[in-house]
Image (tube, helix red, strand yellow):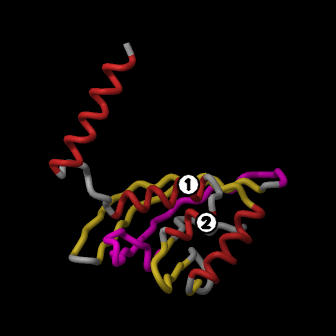
Amino acid sequence: MRRPIHIVATATLAVAVLTGSARAQQPTDVSEQWAGYWNAKNLSAVLRLYGDDPIFCPTNGHSWNGVAQIRKSFAGLLAVYDPRIALASRRSETAGDLAYDSGTYEETIAPVKGGKAIHAAGTYLFLFKRDKHKHWRIVEQTWTSFEPVKL
């Protein structure tokens, strides 16, 4: 009984690819991928979503410029905390090879060694640029916090 379902699924996928009806990657897809990889603490996958020379603006403090500085800062955070973030996109638009996604987030940040979890919420803005392969890459990322958060 499984064989007919497999054949139908394969045929449906082939038709979608051949007719171009398969959905192209959207900027909001990249935002969701970022959140998923962040929650999984998959630093290498998170960093692959960034373009050349990205800027990360945390909720407070100075911005982190370039992949090396973002990697160092993220690695430090992930070594100490176990994050769980959920994004809610409110607006996303594209204009040629540039796009943005903005919305709100809620995050629970649990200390790896135990202790009281920190709850954070605020707004986010991802700016994207298409790379030479037509994939959206994060070129700037900004976060705000509704309430001060102390890590």
**Residue 96 within the magenta-colored segment of the rendering:** no
Residue at numbered disc 2: 44
> Residue type at mark 1?
Ile
Q: Tell me if 128 is positioned left or right of 82 in this view.
A: left
Is 114 left, or right, of 89 in this rendering? Answer: right
Task: Estimate the x, y position of residue 79 in percent, counting from the top left.
Answer: 76, 64
Residue reaching furthest left? Answer: 19
Query: What residue do we see at 45% from left, 67% from top?
Result: 124
Q: Which residue does the image show at 41% across and 54% down from the upper left?
A: 88
Numbered range of the magenta stretch = 113-141
Q: Report the mark closest to the observer, 1 or 2.
A: 2
Question: Disc 1 marks which residue?
Answer: 85
Q: Position of residue 136 (x, y in %)?
A: 36, 69
Secondary structure category for the residue under label 2 = helix
**Residue 100, image quadrant:** bottom left
Q: Quadrant of the C terminus?
A: bottom right
At horizontal 56% and vertical 63% (from top left) the residue drawn is 45
Residue located 50% across and 71% down the image: 143
